[in-house]
């Protein structure tokens, strides 16, 4: 479909030549809808993409970023872009899970793909081509990755959870595919807005909640109202945020500008990986040094999660052609990755 394997330098040189060799095009001014009320996904990731888009197009594409709810419903950003209220968005594809469960595979679910594996699959394993084709065919928008999501904390919990038995009847705030899979594993799942989680944990309305990585969870205060921090985040070991573009607005761009926006997305993914990974380090170190008890899941529970996830995947693939296509691609990639540990040293292990 297109190549995303060009170096940043090559792309920048080509962009400069295109601008210099042609008459200056009329500036393009777009509005960017987001679900984000604030925080790093708005202030860092969305605005980083807007900056890269402006730089790579030689100032031809200008994007103004709007917080969630400003240009339409915060969880209906795809509709906002499709209708043309906003030309572009920074979004989480899993908000469209109810329309097509394939969104869970592209957003990240309990599949075991880490952020690094997700980037490899997306840019070298054919994922980005599937992503754009799926969004265009099923939702009538043009979309590509714009941010990487770090590994989440499995639970902030007022109940110690370590085994599958501990998980039975747990009143758990979650959403999307994990709500289905966690229910199959015995939890009592509750879907609620992120703004309601703190109060629900504090008042005992729920026992536990999952939300994000250490960096994202730190300002929520969940650690102040829930004693246990449960790891690892096998329910969401990695994932992506996306940029969506209105089809009519996209078609008005030159091919060079379209490629430059895709490259802006790729650069933003890399930047978000660097920034969020480093921020997660310090945020988790604070958790370790605080009053919370850090709990590691038993391997038998992790194995049960993966087994149930695979059964859920097989059921969805049997009834959804797109789900099956993306799942087959990811499984083939994961099989390739089984030799990674044979020749690459693990990250974070101190030298001997």
Image (cartoon, helix red, strand yellow):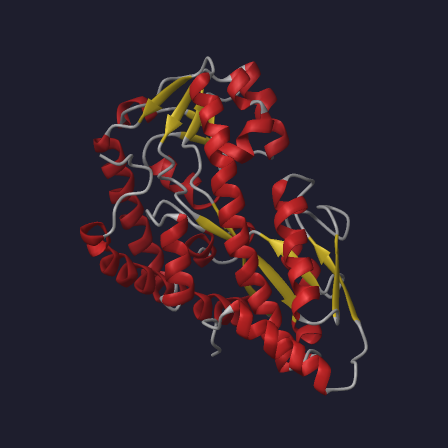
Q: Nearer the viewer, residue 28 or 316?
A: 28
Q: Residue at x 23, y 32 (%)?
A: 299
Q: Residue furthest top?
A: 291
Query: Does residue 79 appear in this view?
Result: no
Q: Nearer the viewer, residue 310 or 232?
A: 232
User: Residue 101 appears at what percent x and percent y?
Assistant: 45, 55
Tell whether 120 sits left or right of 257: left
Q: Residue at x 78, y 80 (%)?
A: 25
Work out whether 248 lies above or below 266.
below
User: Residue 263 appears at what percent x and percent y?
Assistant: 56, 67
Work out whether 279 lies above or below 160.
below
Quarter location, residue 158 = top left
Q: Nearer the viewer, residue 80 or 277?
A: 277
Quarter containing the C terminus: top left
Tell whether 338 sits left or right of 217: left
Query: Does residue 7 appear in this view?
Result: yes
Work out whether 168 lies above or below 44.
above
User: Residue 337 appears at what percent x and percent y?
Assistant: 25, 56
Q: Residue at x 39, y 63 (%)?
A: 320
Q: Residue furthest right?
A: 26
Quarter location, residue 60 = bottom right
User: Residue 292 appears at what percent x and percent y?
Assistant: 44, 16
How many numbered marks have been drawn onto this rendered protein structure? 0
Q: Residue furthest front?
A: 352
Tell whether 162 sits left or right of 33: left
Work out whether 29 lies above or below 233.
below
């Amino acid at each position: 479909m297109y190549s995303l394997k060009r170096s940043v330098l090559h792309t920048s040189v080509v962009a400069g030549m295109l601008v210099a060799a042609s008459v200056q095009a009329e500036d393009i001014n777009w509005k960017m809808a987001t679900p984000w009320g604030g925080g790093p996904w708005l202030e860092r990731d969305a605005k980083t993409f807007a900056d890269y888009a402006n730089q790579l197009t030689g100032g031809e594409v200008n994007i103004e970023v709007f917080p969630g709810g400003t240009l339409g419903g915060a969880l209906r950003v795809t509709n906002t872009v499709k209708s043309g209220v906003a030309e572009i968005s920074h979004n989480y594809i899993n908000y469209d899970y109810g329309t097509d469960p394939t969104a869970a595979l592209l957003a990240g679910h309990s599949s075991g793909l880490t952020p690094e594996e997700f980037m490899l699959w997306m840019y070298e394993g054919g994922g980005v081509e599937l992503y754009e084709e799926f969004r265009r065919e099923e939702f009538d928008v043009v979309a590509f990755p714009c941010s990487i999501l770090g590994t989440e904390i499995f639970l902030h919990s007022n109940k110690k959870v370590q085994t599958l038995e501990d998980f039975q009847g747990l009143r758990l705030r979650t959403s999307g595919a994990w709500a289905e899979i966690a229910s199959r594993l015995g939890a009592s799942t509750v879907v609620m807005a992120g703004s309601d989680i703190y109060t629900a944990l504090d008042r005992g309305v729920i026992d536990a909640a999952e939300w994000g990585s250490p960096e994202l969870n730190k300002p929520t205060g969940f650690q102040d109202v829930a004693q246990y921090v449960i790891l690892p985040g096998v329910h969401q070991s990695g994932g992506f945020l996306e940029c969506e573009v209105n089809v009519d607005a996209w078609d008005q761009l030159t091919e060079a500008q379209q490629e430059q926006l895709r490259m802006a997305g790729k650069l933003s993914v890399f930047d978000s990986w660097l920034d969020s990974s480093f921020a997660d380090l310090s945020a988790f170190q604070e958790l370790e040094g605080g009053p919370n008890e850090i709990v590691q899941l038993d391997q038998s529970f992790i194995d049960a999660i993966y087994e149930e996830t695979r059964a859920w995947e097989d059921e969805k693939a049997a009834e959804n052609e797109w789900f099956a296509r993306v799942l087959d691609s990811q499984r083939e990639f994961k099989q390739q990755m089984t030799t990674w540990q044979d020749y690459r040293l693990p990250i974070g292990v101190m030298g001997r």
